[in-house]
Image (cartoon, rainbow, N blue to C red):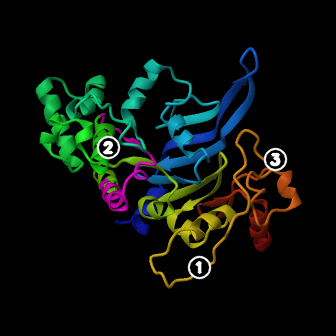
Amino acid sequence: MTSRTAATMQDEAHREPIIVVRDLVKHFPINGGLFGKVVQRVHAVDGVSFEIAKGETLALVGESGCGKSTVGRCLTRLTDITAGEIFVNGQRIDGLGEKDMRPVRKRLSIVFQDPFSSLNPRMNVEALISEPVRNHKIVQGRDARRKYVGDLLERVGLRREDMARMPHQFSGGQRQRICIARALASNPDIIVCDEAVSALDVSVQAQIINLLMKLQADLGLTMLFISHDLAVIEHMSDRVAVMYLGRIVETADRDTLFRAPKHPYTKALLSAVPLPDPTAKRERVILTGDVPSPINPPSGCCFRTRCPIATDECAVTRPELAPVGHGHAVACLKVEAEVMGRKT
């Protein structure tokens, strides 16, 4: 797999953001009782903020259930938000109706995790990819659409002749290429990849990642890349945001995060990444306990129940992302205090 250069990342850091998310909250109600009243709420996303510059890839990483996929679905308006603001190219979209969202959806596509269930098994490839082309009036006429679909298939590494085939006739990697072609069909500026390679074999993952990076370079795409695999994210991303229990606990450019993580949760995640050299040694950070329920998250710092450096103050004060370096922010009271102590 190829990786992004430091020069490219530095150039992209000075661009205006094409996506701005402020204080995003998504709570799912739990109904119960005789009359089905709301008795509890799942705090899936609890105050997430980030920006993505044009042509940049922001990776959103965390354990299963941390809320990262919900962020992607909220950004694409597949799920309505509870609170917060979402801006795409300066336009606020979180309150738009379906009619007003239509031109936004043309520019904002998503690639799902499972290529087996995200393709209609009763439609052939031509029909699957033609659907967004027809809905958004990208090209007119059957012959023009067939040529457009054929060009998309070749761009993602498939053949024009594959248009007549059904989804079950392809391998998992080929199906994901079809999903990528369908995501590109509306000629979008922004692609959300929701665990787009996690269901694939490792060798196929590398092919799809290289394809996504080539498409981004060729088409100038902006990406939100959601994954739990830090090895994949190290090759794919420009910046990384680490999520835990619905909140972002650390954000930095890729090189800084992998070289000098600050948050204890990020350190634990990185310590679990396998090293290519079997003789290399690394201090493993083992977290105790289980991830708390998002129905009843801990008071104060959401990570304090598993944190090896937690103090009494962590149970009372909820830490916010605070800068600890250029482009590097951490939501940890102890880390913030250490940084401020060094500055004074």
Q: Which mark is residue 171?
A: none
- 328 horizontally vs 291: left or right: left
Instruction: Give me the C-alpha separation between circle 2 and circle 1.
Output: 37 Å
SS class, disc 2: helix
On screen, 239 above or below 338? Answer: above
Instruction: Give me the C-alpha separation between circle 3 and circle 2.
Output: 41 Å
As for residue 321 lying within the magenta part, the answer is no
> Of 280 and 189, which appears nearest the observer?
280
Q: Residues within 10 Å of mark 1 (few under 14, many from 20)?
A: few
Q: Where's residue 3, x and y in %? A: 38, 65
Q: Where's residue 134, x and y in %? A: 26, 24
Instruction: Mark 3 and mark 2 in contact? Answer it, CB < 8 Å.
Output: no
Residue position marked by numbered label 3 in the rendering: 299
In the rendered image, which quarter is residue 309 located in?
bottom right
Residue plotted at (22% across, 35% down): 166
Q: Residues within 10 Å of mark 3 (few under 14, many from 20)?
A: some
Residue plotted at (32% across, 31% down): 120
Q: Choose mark 2 or mark 1, whichever is in front.
A: 1
Q: Where's residue 80, x and y in %? A: 57, 28
Which residue appears farthest toward the right when viewing the image?
312
Q: Amino acid at mark 3?
A: Ser
In the rendered image, which quarter is residue 119 located in?
top left
As for residue 203 lying within the magenta part, the answer is yes
Residue position marked by numbered label 2 in the rendering: 180
Q: Residues within 10 Å of mark 2 (few under 14, many from 20)?
A: many
SS class, disc 3: loop
SS class, disc 1: loop
Q: Which mark is residue 282?
A: 1
Residue plotted at (65% across, 59% down): 329
User: Magenta part of the protein: which range?
Assistant: 186-211
Q: Earlier in the sequence, mark 1 or mark 3?
A: 1
